[in-house]
Image (cartoon, rainbow, N blue to C red):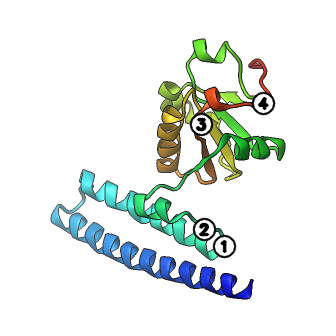
Amino acid sequence: METIAFALAILALISAWNMRARLSKLQDELASLRSVTPGANPPDATHAAQEIDLNRRFLARLAAGEALDPEQIREGRAWTDVSPRAGETMVADGVRLLDVRRADEVAAGVIPGAQWIPVDELPERVGELTRDQAPMLIYCAAGMRSAAACEYLTEQGFDGLWNLAGGFSSWSGPKGKLTS
């Protein structure tokens, strides 16, 4: 068991150093982009700043002892896919829920306790979401729109996001009606 823990610690350290090198490269790139046109913030600089922020968040999560999926780091994806079975456990433990389906889909039922914001309204309504960094399970009908919502919310500074793989159509846990 100690050997496994040691190996995981080594992997986390390697990942952290890799992230640190990537962060340094992005900071240099950002400085270079900003020096081209003083006072301007070109689109590439904005992208570089978002990448730097994401890498800092990855490093903070690693420093806090959180295990990150290597695929997340390679893809630059701060959110995690979760199986319906694991999602049921999360719901039982009181995770926040966000349903991003259309009104006609929500009429067929929701996971009890879910907040409903259709994915196309998310940019205008993101202020309705609590920014306390508590875990949030996001779902749609099949898992694609909720992945897009996770990506958008990551860009807005949210952490602790989980995408329900397979969406509501794969959900076998409790179902109810939207309450407000």
Query: In the image, residue 121 lies at what x, y percent?
Result: 51, 26
Q: Which circle marks residue 127 in the picture?
A: 3
Query: In the image, residue 130 lies at what x, y percent?
Result: 68, 42
State the CA–CA distance, disc 4 to disc 2: 27 Å
Q: Secondary structure at mark 1?
A: loop
State the CA–CA distance, disc 1 to disc 2: 5 Å
Kindly identify the amino acid type of the residue bearing the numbered disc 1: Ala
The answer to which of marks 1 and 4 sits earlier in the sequence is 1
Residue at the left extreme, as displayed: 36
Kindly identify the amino acid type of the residue bearing the numbered disc 3: Gly
Task: Please tell me whether residue 42 is drawn above or below residue 119 in the rendered image.
Answer: below
Name the foreground residue: 77 vs 175.
175
Q: Residues within 10 Å of mark 3 (few under 14, many from 20)?
A: few
Q: Quadrant of the N terminus?
A: bottom right
The answer to which of marks 2 and 3 sits earlier in the sequence is 2
Q: Quadrant of the C terminus?
A: top right
Query: In the image, residue 39 lies at what x, y percent?
Result: 24, 59
Task: Please tell me whether residue 112 is drawn above or below residue 108 in the rendered image.
Answer: below
Name the foreground residue: 107 vs 124.
107
The answer to which of marks 4 and 3 sits earlier in the sequence is 4
The answer to which of marks 4 and 2 sits earlier in the sequence is 2
Q: Which circle marks residue 113 in the picture?
A: 4
